[in-house]
Amino acid sequence: MVSERWSINESAKIYNLNNWGADLFSINKKGNVCVHPSSNSKHSIDLRALVDDLIKRKIKPPILLRFMDVLQGRIASINRVFKNAIQENNYPATYQTFFPIKVNQQRQVVEAIANFGKRYNIGLEVGSKPELVAGISFATGNNLPIICNGYKDTEYIEMVLSATKIGYDITLVVEKLFELEKIVELAKKTGVQPKLGIRVKLSSKGTGKWATSGGEDAKFGLRMSEIIAAIEMLEKHDLVQSVKLLHFHIGSQITKIDKIKTALIEGARIYAEMRKLGVGIQYLDIGGGLGVDYDGSKSSYFSSVNYSIDEYANDVIYQIKNICEDAGVECPNIISESGRATVAHYSVLVTNVLNTNTQNIMPDFEATLTEADKLAPTVKKLVDIYKSIDRYSLREDYHDTLQLIQEAVSLFNLGYLTLNDRALAEWLYGKIIRKINSIVEKIKPIPEELQNFQLALRQTYFANFSLFQSVPDSWAIDQLFPIVPIQRLNQKPDVIASIADITCDSDGEITSFVGENGRTKFLPLHKIRKDEDYYIGFFLIGAYQEILGDMHNLFGDTNAVHITFNKKTGYIIDTVINGDATWESLKYVQYKGPEILKRVRDNLEKDVALRKISIEESSHFLELLDRTLLGYTYLGE
Ligand SMILES: Cc1ncc(COP(=O)(O)O)c(C=O)c1O
């Protein structure tokens, strides 16, 4: 039913879409969510229409939609704000982004970043040998610079030295003093002059979940005394002029701008002092940490940030310039390793909600209301409450209802209530709660003790996805991601829900959502009509989620579709990456599809020979098994 008194603006408000959407998402007149190629662009793609088109192409949900223009737009925005800040502050050096590929290593994603980023001289940051190899594959033929962080063994260092020798622009960052000994030894042995960076452990810390990446106890970086020792060691081996970069990283998703300022001041001071000691550093790498406003609250809450990217860039440039001028040293070229802020926005996971409309198969107890005298006393009391409740008896009736429900369970366990009586009590409880809600909705403000009762109204919507595969941070660190139905937003939502995934894990449920006033326990959704496909979108999931995802219950990678905007046709599908088939998921845990088929077939043949089963039964089963092995790991029809 279309409600007359509901507008798409009201939907935008309850999901806080305009505040977290960075002007990349909107709702069209049809009530569908749209994606824009860049902030405020008048071009858009209707997400629901896109998903319908993909389904026609037999691409099944869950589908990860990657909007490549959005990705490019983010790279352009970050570079634009730094360019502006450099101009405004008359900063005498350059800015460069190094994309930390740990944030999203997918080949097509890094390839897009490397290709589009060429105009901004973008580089890649890597933190392990596999990432180094991935980095080298993109740097080859592209002159793409690489920064190497992370723990390094001999093989890692040798590879970097050898790459330097043959012309790659590759900086080896010393994370630990013991690494430096190995680097010096191998540099001597190979005769290669390395390009070195030093990571410093600041006393400044970030905020929130990643605060421990900074501060004295941080896992990486050299303390001040270790920096002095490193300089001495490098001088001794005539390598001090190889140090070109100073790096610090105080954590991801820094929510407060003042923490960033403090770190910048400390980092810039160390840079200035090292310059004074004669170390020819040319680059100051301020690491990652530029946050994303996941809940749109513009606050220092950990799913948000209390600053814009413009403010961030301005502070970076201003603080570094200030310190360098005071110290009388040359300003460094600035590098940031902004990962989250580059890729969070560009991907959206869309999946179908499994139809939860069970109304028509529930027993109809309505008739019993007229024959209440025949009911068990506990159930009868519930009927009485249901009939008499009004705004004045609300509190008392609510508490009595809770007590009666508990009583019904106890009486059932003792054998005094039948299954039918207990079902009736459960049904009445639902009716009473809904009646209370309709009264409470009209009372403002809602009395405190009645606020939580709404939880009893919350329905569980089952969605065709694995939380552990697609939004692992929602489970691991309780991070908020905006979740919005992608259609019917011109209709008032009539259900409040939590979102459960299809894993057999009770942790696979989302009960915290982005709402109008910050975090809420309810996601407003629509009652799903019979035969209707109802999709929900998980937004801002481009950073970390794809690679941190795991294979709980062997639900594998989802289908992924890369989309670019096109003025004529609306959009173009650049590529479709098939999600894992069942045999691929099984392969991760050492099962082999053909072997499974063979074993089952051989065994069935024995049963056929003994006439326990027919040839048809055997081949039907094998056919199904084969089809399942080749099929998608997620739910179909
Ligand atoms: C050294 C380093 N650089 C960059 C990043 C990326 O940070 P962010 O995604 O917050 O930009 C990280 C991640 O924590 C990191 O450890």
Image: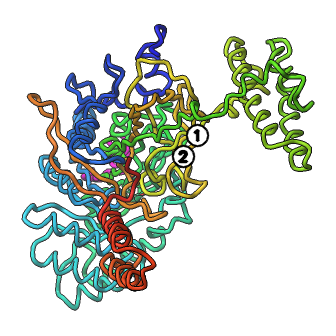
Residue at 37% of width from left, 50% of height from top? Answer: 636
Give the answer, above or below, for where 457 lies relative to 636: above
Taking the view exactly as shown, the residue that stands out farthest to the bottom is 189
Q: Name the residue type under label 1.
A: Thr
Q: Are marks 1 and 2 in contact (CB under 8 Å)?
A: yes
Residue at 86% of width from left, 15% of height from top? Answer: 393
Give the answer, above or below, for where 181 lies relative to 112: below
Residue 283 position, x and y percent, is 27, 58
Taking the view exactly as shown, the residue that stands out farthest to the top is 4
For disc 1, the marked residue is 460
Q: Report the front residue among 599 and 565.
A: 599
Q: Range of the magenta residues?
A: 317-335
Taking the view exactly as shown, the residue that stands out farthest to the front is 611
Number of callouts: 2
Residue 488 colored magenta?
Answer: no
For disc 2, the marked residue is 500
Is any atom of residue 46 visible in this view?
yes
